Image (tube, grey):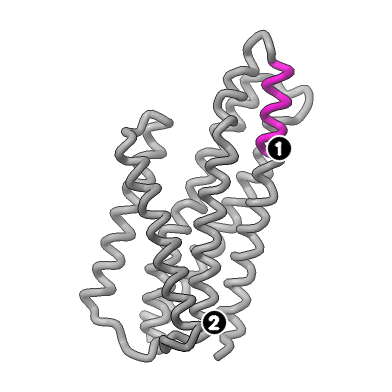
Amino acid sequence: MPEIAVFTLLHLLVFVYWLGGDLGAFYTSRFLIKPGISTDRRMLAAKVVNDVDMAPRTALILAFPTGLTLAHVKGWLSLPLPLPLLVAVWIAALIWLALAWAIHMKHGAAPALWRQADLAIRWLLIGGLTAVAVWNIAGSGSLPLFLSLKLLALAGCTAFGLFIRAVLKPLGPALMGLAGPDAAAAEASLAATLNRARPLVTGIWALLIAAAFLALLKPV
């Protein structure tokens, strides 16, 4: 069936751009703290990291609608989903995606309401996915185990992303301080901030790989 091929490809692209984008941002971030790099080049590297990071952010938002649709067309769900519900999920995801990109394009000047809405959506996603997964793992639902575990992985990735945001809050002031009189302290703060974020980034990679493995294994 062509729809199976289409949504399998879309879900694979989510994985590829998420992991690949994260790897690209992770590698480029090394130039922020590399000795001998000028402030201008560090600021350029920071912009590249921020732009490349939109690939995994986009992938996170599209992971659920593509995965849900794929589960539907492959018959992994005990009951087929009504078409209006699938359409509603896609509309909601695309609205969230537009919001995320609008915040990014404002380059830090996005209205507080936009950022709060994005944050609320992420926490709702974490809570909803975790609740559904635990409900089914406990035997109260009919979702296959591998799908329940994939929901937990997506919830975990979203949570790690929020933790990374919190850890990276000192990044902006540290970057701006590189051109000031206390550049050494700013550089030390920059290195410490990135070092705290790296374990969380690798946690996301581990969950992504686990989710991909579950999709290939398809346990009951």
Image coordinates for residue 171, horizontal then vertical, percent: 59, 31
Image coordinates for residue 119, horizontal then vertical, percent: 40, 48
Is residue 116 highlighted in magenta? Answer: no
Does residue 166 lie above or below 33 as drawn?
below
Query: Label 1 is placed on what type of residue?
Result: Arg
Which element type, helix, strand or loop, lies under badge 2? Answer: helix
Does residue 77 lie above or below 153 as drawn?
below
To which residue does mark 1 refer? 30
Cα–Cα span, label 2 and label 1 = 36 Å
> Which comes sooner in the sequence, label 2 or label 1?
1
Q: 196 or 52: nearer the eye?
A: 196
Residue 146, which numbered label? 2
Residue 133, which numbered label? none
Mostly what secondary structure, the magenta segment? helix
Q: Do the residues labelled 2 and 1 touch (CB within 8 Å)?
A: no
Where is the C terminus found, in terms of image quarters? bottom right
Does residue 183 lie above or below 113 as drawn?
above
Is residue 186 highlighted in magenta? Answer: yes
Instruction: Name the residue at 71% across, 40% down.
Output: 195
Give the residue furthest to the top. Answer: 181
Image coordinates for residue 177, horizontal then vertical, percent: 61, 17
Where is the N terminus found, in terms of image quarters? bottom left
Q: Quadrant of residue 129?
A: bottom left
Give the residue furthest to the left. Answer: 84
Q: In this view, does 161 lie to the left or right of 95?
A: right
Give the class, few, some or many, for how many residues have Cα within 10 Å of label 1's Cα (few <14, many ≥20).
Answer: some
The region drawn magenta spans 183-194
